[in-house]
Amino acid sequence: MKLAGFLLLLAGWAIVLAAVVLLVPALPRTGFVLAGVGVEVLGLVVVVRSHLAVQGEQRE
Amino acid sequence: MTPLPAPVLSETAVTLCIFFILLVPLAAAGLALVNAGLGRSRSAAHSMLTSLSVIAVAAVVYFVFGFSWQGFIGQPAHVFTMGGRAWSWISAEPLFLRGLRLDDIPTLLAAWLQMLSVGLAALIPLGAGADRWRMGASAASTALLAGCTYPLFAHWVWGGGWLAQLGVNCGLGHGFVDAGGSSSIHILGGLTALSIAWILGPRLGKYGHTGLPNAIPGHNSVLVLTGCMLAWVGWLGLNSAGGILFTGAEPGRVVMIAVNTTLAAASASLTSATVTWRRFGKPDASLIANGWIGGLVASSAACPFLKPPTAVIVGIVAGGLVMFAVEWFEFGLKVDDPGAAISVHALSGIWGVLAVGLLAQFSGRTSGQFLAQLVGIATLIGFVLPLTYGLNWLLNRFYPQRVAADGERQGMDLHELGADAYPEFVIHTEGFIQQ
């Protein structure tokens, strides 16, 4: 699960990079950058939840 | 091909820059004192010695690899072409600083400032790993930071790399802008601190069976607050030297940098003081100190481009953010960060970088500036965090980073150094053993 979270972080960054490099019009570029940031936020949530789960198991 | 032009500095700017860089070690001294004061008394000497060690490791590794990967604007770099535009992704300087020439003053100054800055970035994770991070492991982790993550990202921001080129290549304002290091020093250091806190896990006794955190207060508020004052002087040097070297600030603008830096720190600490006073009935020294440093961190990115009222806004938001982030990490995310390194450096740094897009006043084109700043933040979270976590996770597989449980109970001073910081009056108790 942690690995999936970090892969989501990288995927989000790849979307941001692609948007900046390949898109020229402002609106689609901004939209795709925001979408990439959204994927990164999702990745962060997954990583955080996996660490919380590991800590919970260690306490038990 | 769209390389950024090499900066040209007047004699006055060079003299001022040398003076300001001489102040930067005070920022490192300040952070080291803050980290030591917020840790336990039985790890105080270990904390200070580790701080000195990581500064030494960072300087040597940066001399060997770091600057050759980071470089400076106008120096040779590796580029790739995409979308019909050339993007610089890593410097092509020779190892061991052999590319430095005595007549190239801006590059010499940049190399000197960066050698100090990388030490500052390496100090940040020590706050998160306090009381349980082995000295050898922290030195090895610092080598990874100074030799890999820091120079790579700093090239993108300060070495004429692809983030700095966003303005020229994509029309996004002036490209990613960070005058004093909110991103390349503080967010990078803060994300490394988060990785370390995750890898090490919480201190023994920090979280009970119910998952609620136990308070483990810092052992010396005087050290912490003295550290804040030293850090202030160091930050004046860091922001001013960065402003001159990386944004071409004229000497007159440097006065405004100093005013903005001070106002941001002051308003952040006053915000923290007000919030703690209202919530707890008394001001909390460690949280106010965190607010002060958070204000300094947030001021770094935008300080040459702010007007004093907007610097106050930057500080107020940073002070409030740090206050609530410290609690959120401790209670909500169960991250044990004794020095509040993640809240103070990563989150305040993110706010400081975004403030460039929201509040900074540039001459010339500004449309797209916020998007450029957002791309920089996305790069830190989407690339630098997995990279620094992965490197430290690998290191931990081969060389365990956390001290043994007995050593943690005994205290890092006795366990790793064989002597206490305060041998005359410290009584070791088992007060924080897991219940």
Image (spheres, rainbow, N blue to C red):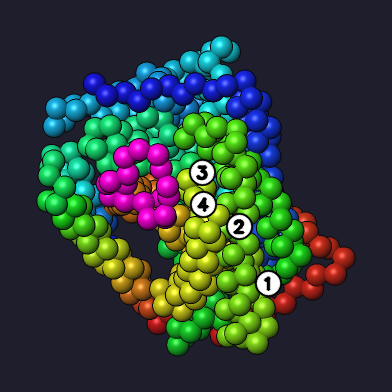
Residue tagged by mark 3? Answer: B304
Q: What stretch is highlighted in magenta?
A: B355-371
Chain under callout 1: B
Q: Which amino acid does label 2 sit on?
A: Leu
* Spot occupied by residue B162 in the image (x, y as percentages of width and height): 30, 34
Query: What is the distance, in whole Å, between disc 1 and disc 2 at their CAs?
Result: 19 Å
Label 2 or label 4, whichever comes before in sequence order: 2
Label 4: state its secondary structure.
loop
Label 3 or label 1, whichever comes before in sequence order: 1
**Mark 2 neighbour density, 10 Å: few (under 14) some (14–19) many (20 or more):** many
Find residue B285 and name its label.
1
Quarter-wise, where is residue A53 in the image?
bottom left
Query: What is the distance, in whole Å, between disc 1 and disc 4 at their CAs?
Result: 29 Å
Query: What is the distance, in whole Å, between disc 3 and disc 2 at their CAs?
Result: 13 Å
**Mark 4 neighbour density, 10 Å: few (under 14) some (14–19) many (20 or more):** some
* Spot occupied by residue B37 in the image (x, y as percentages of width and height): 69, 63
Chain under callout 3: B
Label 1 or label 2, whichever comes before in sequence order: 2
| Residue under disc 2 on the same chain as residue under disc 4 | yes
Q: Which amino acid does label 4 sit on?
A: Lys
Question: Can residue B361 be found in the magenta stretch?
Answer: yes
Q: Is residue B371 visible?
A: yes
Taking B66 as reference, is B414 left or right? right
Residue tagged by mark 2? Answer: B263
